[in-house]
């Protein structure tokens, strides 16, 4: 079958989610935000009063995840917080956690829900590990300063009180953890289009990607 699978990877707050949602709407594809699954595992560990850096606690939380518990955790206010992001990147470094989440992500790509003609997945290792055969691969990035500014704006719009220098440092720590981990580190797939959105707004980024998809049939 000729499902259109679009893999979007890149660091936090680079604009992956906005782009992915728009592509999914425009092209009639299902969308999976894989970061929210790692966040749900991180939040589940935090709520149990355990340490997200503890390999056994992280693995147990990932293995216990069900579609129902996932959707409950995805409603938790902690999910989108800075603490939720940090917990996600700590549990995401554990091979057992990544393994437990792999089948779910692959099943979504190969059998998208509804009558979707394909799927858009965004995360850190979609083009390299989860969907290495995706027809379109994008690596969306931006300078760490610009990404920290965007994250500060987003958190303030949600009513959170944040300090810019702290958000910037958290972002650098998370980049470092995601790039340095032994299993499925954040890096562009060899055949990915690298899109730097530091100086691109959402419309320009979307137009660049549509042109690229057009070229790839
Ligand atoms: O994309 P988001 O910031 O929500 O992801 C949270 C964390 O989950 C990332 O920092 C990363 O450590 C982890 N993650 C991952 N692999 C993915 C998606 C997210 O390791 N495919």
Image (cartoon, grey):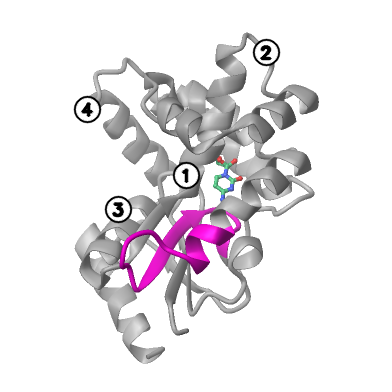
Q: Looking at the image, is 145 positioned above or below residue 21?
A: above
Q: Which mark is residue 50?
A: 2
Q: Position of residue 159 (x, y in %)?
A: 24, 18
Count numbered badges in the picture. Answer: 4
Instruction: Confirm or reject: label 2 Cβ below 8 Å from ligand 1.
Output: no
Circle 4 is placed at which residue position?
A: 157
Asked whether mark 4 lies closer than 8 Å to ligand 1, one says no
Residue name at image x 64 percent, y 52 percent:
102
Tell me if residue 59 comes above or below residue 50 in the rendering: below
Q: Earlier in the sequence, mark 3 or mark 4?
A: 3
Whether residue 69 can be seen here: yes
35 on left or right of 27? right
Q: Secondary structure at mark 4?
A: helix
- The reply to whether dot 1 and dot 2 touch (C-beta < 8 Å) is no
The Cα atoms of the two marked residues, 2 and 3, are separated by 32 Å
Q: Quadrant of residue 214?
A: bottom left
Residue 201 can be seen in this image: no
Q: Could you say whether the residue bearing mark 2 is in a helix, strand or loop? A: loop
- First reached walking from the N terminus: tag 1 or tag 2: 1
Q: Is mark 1 within 8 Å of ligand 1?
A: yes
Chain-order first, disc 4 or disc 2:
2
Residue 116 is a magenta residue = yes
């Amino acid at each position: 079958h000729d499902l259109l699978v679009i893999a979007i990877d890149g660091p936090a707050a680079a604009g992956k989610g906005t782009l992915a949602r728009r592509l999914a709407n425009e092209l009639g594809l299902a969308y999976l935000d894989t970061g929210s699954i790692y966040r749900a595992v991180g939040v589940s560990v935090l709520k149990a009063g355990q340490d997200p850096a503890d390999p056994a606690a992280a693995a147990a939380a990932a293995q216990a995840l069900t579609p129902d518990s996932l959707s409950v955790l995805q409603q938790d206010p902690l999910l989108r917080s800075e603490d939720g992001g940090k917990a996600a990147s700590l549990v995401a470094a554990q091979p057992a956690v990544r393994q437990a989440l792999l089948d779910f992500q692959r099943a979504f790509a190969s059998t998208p829900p509804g009558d979707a003609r394909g799927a858009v997945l965004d995360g850190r290792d979609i083009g390299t590990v989860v969907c290495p055969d995706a027809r379109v691969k994008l690596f969306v990035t931006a300078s760490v300063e610009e990404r920290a500014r965007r994250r500060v704006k987003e958190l303030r719009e949600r009513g959170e009180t944040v300090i810019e220098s702290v958000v910037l440092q958290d972002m650098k720590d998370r980049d470092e953890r995601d790039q340095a981990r032994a299993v499925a580190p954040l890096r562009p797939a060899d055949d990915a289009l690298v899109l730097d959105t530091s100086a691109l707004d959402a419309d320009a980024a979307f137009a660049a990607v549509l042109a690229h998809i057009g070229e790839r049939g």
